[in-house]
Every structure is written in structure tokens, then in C-alpha cells.
């Protein structure tokens, strides 16, 4: 019994289709991916942001009203001893309320919230540690908030030892202007 041979044009067509699909994927995803690492914060503290507030004061950005309730730095680990999340430096936990002031359900993305240290560097959230910090409701930042409703939860940042969390930049979405909240 002989094995049927695949014509050369079919082999080439397969590579052309795969290459085209890869190129299409790069064209669709490429504009959303930016690689930048020059050792400087990507956005200096206080730049291009609508307002600045302080702890306990309501601030608005887009469809959300935020209130930072409290924050605590210096936490080394979060979660149960057998499956805990350990900080690379130290965890800073921020208790935050987000209220939907819009007219449609919306998800408040914890990943859109930026933290700035006393060193001026920008820090992102640690979602894995955030799951442990919100053990009573680990989906707090992953559920839709209906108009008029609010949720309170904890957002976790991982900062180097010796650096304090100085300011937050809170966003309705990744594309919103954001509002600053001073923590000092």
C-alpha cells in the first residue's frame, strides 16, 4: 500500500495560511502591546490626571466614584500557610470602595489602578495576592457592578522594602484620565 503524496502547492498553501493568520494576529494585538523599559516610571506622579484627592474623600473618574478607606504597607505574605502568596518586597494593601455612578453595569478592573511609591516609580496590582486579601469575596473586582451599587475590597501592590505607597491613580477603565489620591 502506498501513501498518497501531498502536492507541493498544498504544502505551500498551508504555510501561507499559517503565516497570514500569524500576521493578522500581530496586526490585531500589536497596537495594544507596548514594550517600554527605560528604568523610569511610564507616567510621572501628577501628570495628565484630572484631579487629586486624599484618603476618605470620594473622587470620580468616568462611571465610578472611588473612596480609598485605608492602606497598610509592610505585609510579607497573604493567604494560608500552605498556599500563601509571598511579596517580592512588601505588600501594600489598599481598602477601596467603587460605586457605579453610570447607567449601565460595569466591571471595575483592579489592573487599571496604578500605585506610585515614595521613589516616584509606578507599580501595578498583584491579582493573585488580591484573591487572598479578598477571601470573603474573591470575585469583588471581577463582577459587574450595577448602577447605584458599590463594592468594597482590597487592592494589593508589591513594592520594594523601604518604599512606601505614596499615591494612587484610580481609573474607570484603562483609557480613562484617572484621578489621584494622596496617601500621605
Image: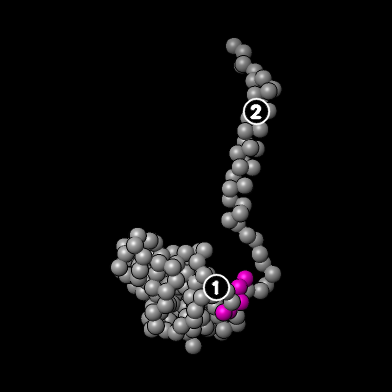
Classify 150 as above or below 22.
Answer: below
Determine if the magenta segment contains residue 110.
no
What secondary structure is the magenta-colored segment mainly?
loop
Q: Which residues are magenta?
A: 42-46
Residue pointed to by mark 1: 123
Q: Which mark is residue 151?
A: none
Of helix, strand and loop, which one carries label 2? helix
Disc 1 or 2, which lies upstream in sequence? 2
Residue 2, horizontal then vertical, whole percent: 62, 13
Is 45 covered by the magenta stretch? yes
Q: Is residue 139 visible?
A: no
Between 44 and 10, the one lying in front of the other is 44
**Vertical side of 116 occupied by 7: above or below:** above
Residue 74 location (% of width, % of height): 48, 82
Q: Dot 1 lies on which element? A: strand
Q: Quadrant of the N terminus?
A: top right
Residue 2 visible in the picture: yes
Looking at the image, residue 133 sits to the left or right of residue 116; the answer is left
**In screen coordinates, is 154 left or right of 14?**
left
Q: Quadrant of residue 128?
A: bottom left
Farthest residue, direction bottom: 184
Location of mark 2 (residue): 13
* Residue at the image position 50 percent from the left and 66 percent from the top: 176
Residue farthest along the top direction in this orientation: 1
Amino acid at each position: 500500500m502506498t501513501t498518497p503524496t501531498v502536492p507541493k502547492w498544498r504544502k505551500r498553501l498551508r504555510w501561507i495560511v499559517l503565516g497570514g493568520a500569524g500576521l493578522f494576529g500581530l496586526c490585531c494585538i500589536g497596537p495594544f502591546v507596548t514594550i517600554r523599559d527605560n528604568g523610569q516610571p511610564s507616567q510621572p506622579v501628577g501628570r495628565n490626571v484630572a484631579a487629586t484627592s486624599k484618603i476618605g474623600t470620594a473622587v470620580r473618574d468616568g462611571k465610578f466614584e472611588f473612596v480609598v478607606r485605608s492602606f497598610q504597607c509592610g505585609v510579607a505574605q497573604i493567604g494560608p500557610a500552605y498556599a500563601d502568596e509571598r511579596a517580592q518586597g512588601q505588600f501594600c494593601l489598599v481598602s477601596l470602595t467603587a460605586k457605579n455612578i453610570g447607567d449601565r453595569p460595569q466591571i471595575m478592573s483592579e489592573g487599571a489602578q496604578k500605585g506610585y511609591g515614595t521613589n516616584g516609580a509606578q507599580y501595578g496590582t498583584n491579582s493573585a495576592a488580591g484573591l487572598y486579601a479578598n477571601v470573603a469575596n474573591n470575585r469583588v473586582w471581577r463582577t459587574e457592578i450595577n448602577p447605584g451599587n458599590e463594592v468594597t475590597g482590597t487592592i494589593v501592590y508589591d513594592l520594594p522594602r523601604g518604599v512606601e505607597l505614596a499615591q494612587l491613580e484610580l481609573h474607570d477603565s484603562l483609557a480613562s484620565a484617572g484621578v489621584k489620591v494622596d496617601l500621605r
